[in-house]
């Protein structure tokens, strides 16, 4: 049941890759998913209670049910294979979602920048690699016992649901406030006295109530699961959450300190006046990704050695380097700026070529 519910979150996370309009097709998928989930849950629950099956540690209720109805023949084995295929897809959803999430966190400075770099196969290789390492560690620690992993999995699912629903409440609250401020700026009167505005504001409150109720229900399920499964592995959450929070904050502070130390301003540029040479005996190539103290000093040192200096900008992420080109040219040192596109996300090979 919990595994099936995670499909709801997959649709929410992958909404941007759906055919436009995204929200229309996302609603259709969620309605179909909810209908199938409700039908399967109710039918399986009714059948199991009607037959009188008892949960066993070595066989699932679905396996017991199909074996009771069809015997141990090919139909029973087919259902087992389909169930295994669904679980494989559920595991694949983690490999589809976590690398993207890690890339977003890396772009915001909460994880190492390497997580935001696409590999040669156009996937976030670092996220996939570390997710695999984490999965191997968990499977090893829990001795490949899925029943021991389920409490930890359920807590992670309900925690994600609670946070996402709470985030939507905050989002609708901000949208309501932004709408009221916009309407007040356009008219002098109170927006609450306008029927159309009241209807829109009521819609915001309705959305806040729906998401708030969802957050309350998932939080209740989270607390019940955590209390019931605390000694079965749920206590790991009390260790993991503070640890990863401390890790993310430490990484963010590191990047902030590095940026503070490496950033340059107009005073620093004016103070550093390299002795420009007119010699063209050497051609010096200086690869940079942005203009900071390190790259600035490298260009200055190269310009002191040769007049033929080429600042090389390799673009593995297909970024817009126009602002960086303007910064380099504003130095007025007579250097040539060369931009190289790298559609396959390689850095060293384009420089060599």
Image (spheres, rainbow, N blue to C red):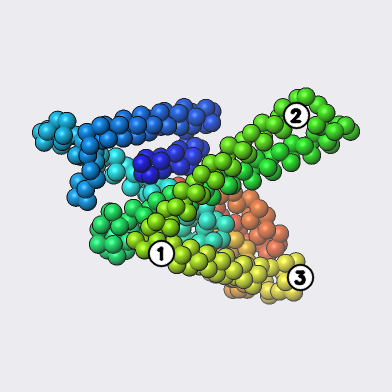
- Residue at the (20%, 46%) spot, across then down: 59
Q: What element carries label 1?
A: helix
Report the number of discs.
3
Determine which of the numbered discs, if any, sits on residue 30 in the image.
Answer: none
- Determine which residue is flagged by label 3: 267
Q: Are marks 2 and 1 in contact (CB under 8 Å)?
A: no
Image-quadrant location for residue 264: bottom right
In the displayed structure, 326 sits above or below 193; it is below
- Determine which residue is flagged by label 1: 236
In the displayed structure, 128 sits above or below 79; it is below
Cα distance between the residues tagged 2 and 1: 47 Å
- Mark closer to the observer (3, 2): 2
Question: Would residue 41 appear left or right of 111 to someone viewing this image?
Answer: left
- The crowding category of the residue bearing disc 2, from other C-alpha atoms within 10 Å (few below 14, some 14 to 19, many at least 20), is some
Q: Which residue lies furthest to the top in this view?
A: 195
Q: Where is residue 108 in the image (x, y as percent from the top left)?
A: 57, 57
- Residue at the (22%, 37%) spot, across then down: 52
Q: Where is residue 343 in the image (x, y as percent from the top left)?
A: 45, 47
Q: What element carries label 2?
A: helix
Q: Position of residue 40 (x, y in %)?
A: 33, 32
- Determine which residue is flagged by label 2: 198
Image-quadrant location for residue 213: top right
Does the rendering let one see residue 300?
no
Cα distance between the residues tagged 3 and 2: 54 Å
Question: Would residue 277 appear left or right of 243 to someone viewing this image?
Answer: right
Marked residue nearer the N-terminal end (2 or 1): 2
């Amino acid at each position: 049941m919990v595994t099936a519910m995670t499909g709801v979150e997959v649709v929410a996370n992958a909404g941007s890759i759906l055919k436009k309009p995204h929200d229309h097709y996302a609603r259709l998928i969620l309605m179909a998913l909810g209908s199938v989930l409700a039908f399967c849950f109710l039918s399986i629950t009714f059948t199991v209670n009607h037959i009188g099956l008892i949960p066993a540690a070595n066989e699932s209720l679905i396996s017991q049910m199909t074996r009771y109805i069809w015997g141990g023949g090919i139909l029973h084995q087919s259902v087992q294979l389909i169930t295994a295929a669904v679980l494989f897809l559920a595991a694949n959803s983690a490999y589809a979602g976590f690398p993207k999430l890690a890339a977003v966190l890396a772009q915001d400075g909460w994880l190492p920048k390497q997580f935001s770099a696409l590999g040669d196969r156009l996937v976030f290789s670092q996220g996939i690699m570390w997710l695999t390492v984490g999965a191997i560690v968990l499977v090893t620690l829990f001795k490949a016992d899925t029943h021991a992993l389920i409490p930890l999995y359920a807590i992670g699912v309900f925690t994600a649901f609670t946070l996402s629903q709470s985030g939507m409440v905050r989002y609708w609250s901000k949208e309501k406030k932004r709408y009221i401020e916009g309407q007040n700026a356009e008219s002098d009167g109170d927006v609450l006295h306008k029927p159309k505005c009241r209807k829109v504001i009521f819609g915001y409150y309705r959305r806040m109530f729906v998401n708030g109720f969802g957050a309350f229900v998932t939080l209740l399920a989270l607390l019940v699961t955590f209390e019931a499964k605390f000694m079965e592995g749920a206590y790991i959450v009390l260790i993991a959450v503070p640890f990863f929070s401390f890790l993310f904050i430490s990484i963010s502070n590191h990047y902030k300190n590095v940026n503070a130390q490496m950033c340059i301003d107009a005073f620093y540029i004016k103070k550093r006046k390299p002795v420009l040479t007119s010699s063209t005996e050497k051609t010096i190539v200086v690869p940079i990704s942005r203009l900071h103290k390190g790259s600035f000093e490298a260009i200055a040192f190269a310009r002191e050695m040769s007049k033929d200096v080429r600042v090389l900008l390799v673009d593995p992420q297909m970024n817009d380097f126009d602002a960086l080109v303007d910064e380099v040219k504003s130095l007025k040192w007579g250097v040539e700026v060369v931009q190289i596109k790298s559609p396959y996300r390689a850095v060293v090979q384009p420089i060599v070529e």
